[in-house]
Image (cartoon, rainbow, N blue to C red):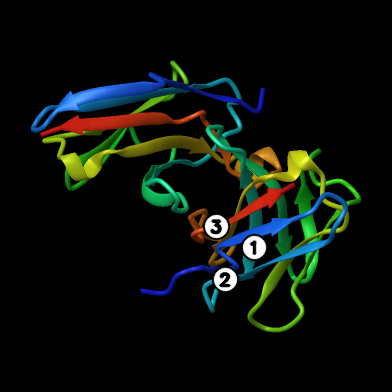
Amino acid sequence: EPEVTQTPSHQVTQMGQEVILRCVPISNHLYFYWYRQILGQKVEFLVSFYNNEISEKSEIFDDQFSVERPDGSNFTLKIRSTKLEDSAMYFCASRKDRASYEQYFGPGTRLTVT
Amino acid sequence: QQQVKQSPQSLIVQKGGISIINCAYENTAFDYFPWYQQFPGKGPALLIAIRPDVSEKKEGRFTISFNKSAKQFSLHIMDSQPGDSATYFCAAIPGYRGGSEKLVFGKGTKLTVNP
């Protein structure tokens, strides 16, 4: 069964450094998302992406964050200058098309900012 | 109100029992209500989902009950098994009517099924 994959599984970085989290969505899906989950808390929406554009973003997704689909398979989240409070699990999700609402999540990347 | 309120925070059930998790919402524009199951260190996995035009959906041992007038929906796990021990999240999507496709999650329920 097709699944969303994410790399790396764990990323440790120092405050102020840039990180890029990578995702490979399910191959025939058209809508892509990033969510994050701070330890012990609920999953929060960051951004949605369709047709090479951001379609929606949350208040969390400020100028330090960016997303890109550099080729036909990868979907990346970049944090330009990490802060301690960026430490969280970051999940990528994908959705097939406009007619279906189901979002399928990857296993996540644990980001630790020291 | 873009919130989904979930209860209880934790639940302990004996093997073979019924687990019931409840969620409530305010935004009548919500158009799709999924439940996700999450094991430690893993991503949320879509379990079952319902649209507001039906009152119940059953898939195997998992059932969603939906009460549109009360703006509540619940997950029932019949014949609960130790392998069901996980955190369960309810969620909602405003949909096209609500102008958003993002998932709005509840805070989660940690279910423990004792053998």
What residue is at 64 percent from the left and 63 percent from the top? A32
What residue is at 30 percent from the left and 31 percent from the top? B111
Q: Is residue B72 above or below residue B92?
A: above
The answer to which of A44 and A12 lies nearer the viewer is A12
Element class at badge 2? loop
* Discs 1/3, front: 3
Crowd class of label 2 (few under 14; some 14 to 19; many from 20; radius 10 Å): many
Label located before the other in sequence (1 or 2)? 2
Crowd class of label 1 (few under 14; some 14 to 19; many from 20; radius 10 Å): many
The answer to which of B81 and A15 lies nearer the viewer is A15
Q: Which mark is residue A32?
A: 1
Mark 3 and mark 2 on one chain:
yes
Q: Is residue A10 left or right of residue A57?
A: left
Residue B53 visible to an observer of this rendering: no
Q: Is residue B88 left or right of residue A107?
A: left
* Discs 3/2, front: 3
Q: Chain of mark 1?
A: A
Residue A64 visible to an observer of this rendering: yes
In the displayed orientation, state which residue is furthest to the right.
A63
* Amino acid identity at mark 1: Phe
Label located before the other in sequence (3 or 2)? 2
Q: Chain of mark 2?
A: A
Quadrant of residue A10 within the rendered picture: bottom right
Label 3: which residue?
Answer: A108
* Amino acid identity at mark 3: Gly
Q: CA distance from mark 1 to mark 3?
A: 14 Å
Q: Is residue B23 above or below residue B79?
A: above
Quadrant of residue B80 within the rendered picture: top left
Label 2: which residue?
Answer: A25
Q: Which mark is residue A112?
A: none
Element class at badge 1? strand
